[in-house]
Amino acid sequence: MRTRSLVGVATLVLLALIFSLSLYVAHIGRVFGECRLVQLLKVPSPNGSKSVVAYRKECGSTVPDSTQASIVSTGNSFSPERAPPFFVISGHQDILATWSGEQVVRIGLIPGVNRVYKRDESAGDIRIQYE
């Protein structure tokens, strides 16, 4: 009977250690795997129904920083998962955005050596012009 109790206690201790270790690993993954989004600008459309949001994505030393732009509907909080970027460039870049009516966004950049990862010509029903 005593052996069975010791096996039970040892099993509980082992399960507690495994659970604690899994929580620790999950926490480390969140700390080092999370990216920080820094909003650079938000420019509403003429009627205010949408906005261009430019932001910098900073993921620490494991992934290079990038500058991105998305279209967000008014009333929705910004999330790159809900409003995927139409423009992505490496590093820290200043983006200028203006609306030419309700369906056209003009994106201006200061020329540089940054690498362009994504440069869509439209985002949904919005046409994108690059200058």
Image (cartoon, rainbow, N blue to C red):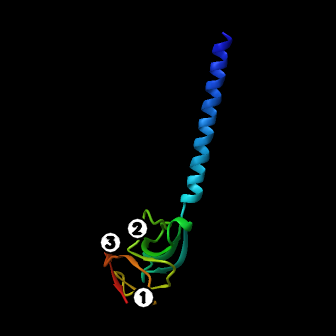
Give the Cα distance between marks 2 and 1.
Answer: 19 Å
Q: Secondary structure at mark 3?
A: loop
For image coordinates 31% across by 79% down, the residue present is: 121
Instruction: Tell me if mark 1 has few (under 14), some (14-19) or many (20+) residues whose alpha carbon lies within 10 angstroms of its own.
Output: some
Q: Which label was assigned to residue 108? A: 1
Q: Earlier in the sequence, mark 2 or mark 3?
A: 2
Q: Residue at x 36, y 82 (%)?
A: 102
Would you place residue 39 above or below residue 25 in this image? below
Q: Nearer the viewer, residue 61 or 131?
A: 61
The residue where tag 3 is placed is 124
Quick one: which residue is furthest to the top in this view? 1
Q: Which residue is mark 2?
A: 84
Report the quarter where the N terminus lies.
Answer: top right
Front residue (pair 33, 55): 33
Q: Tell me the distance, in whole angstroms, between the alpha carbons under discs 3 and 1.
A: 20 Å
The Cα–Cα distance between marks 2 and 3, rounded to whole angstroms, is 10 Å
Q: How many residues crowd mark 2 within 10 Å: few (<14), some (14–19), many (20+)?
A: some
Mark 2 or 3: in front is 2
Residue 67 % position (x, y): 48, 76
